[in-house]
Amino acid sequence: MKPWKEYKNYVKAIDENSKHAIEEIEALTEIVSSVIKKCTELGISQRALAAACNIPQSSVARIESLKTKPKLGTLMKLMRPLGLKLQVTSIA
């Protein structure tokens, strides 16, 4: 794992565009991981979550596998029935 982290930090240091792309992916991964973890804790399937959010189960699957970047509204729909919320914090 360490070589990947070192490489990722190297790329972020030399290329500003790549830095932003990596940070965006990391943030999305953290959010989606929180949704998956909460679903697991509550015993909620993709199908049940999709039904609670009135979205297709295939959309939940694509979001969980990071094959698509969900819109903010979709994230809010997913998080609400799980008792999760997004919180904005300063990174400085």
Image: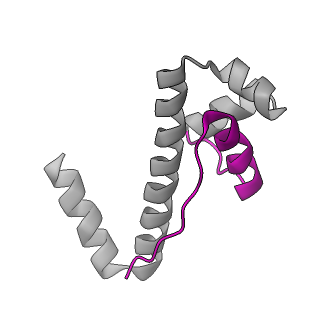
Q: Residue at x 54, y 61 (%)?
A: 87
Task: State the count of labels.
Answer: 0
Q: Residue furthest right?
A: 54
The answer to whether 34 appears left or right of 45 in the picture is: left
Where is residue 7? Give x, y as percent: 23, 61
Look at 79% across and 24% down and name the residue there: 51
Q: Which residues are magenta?
A: 66-92
Above or below for 46 versus 64: above
Residue at x 48%, y 41% (from the top left corner) = 34
Q: Is residue 73 magenta?
A: yes
Looking at the image, which is closer to me, 7 or 74? 74
Which residue, as the protein is rendered here, is positioned at the far front?
A: 83
Residue 82 locus on image (x, y percent): 61, 34
What colour-coding does the image apply? one colour
Q: Quadrant of the N terminus?
A: top left
Please check the rendered image and state whether residue 42 is part of the magenta-colored stretch, yes or no: no
User: Which image quadrant: the C terminus?
Assistant: bottom left
User: Which percent across, then down, holds residue 2?
Assistant: 15, 51
The answer to whether 27 appears left or right of 66 in the picture is left
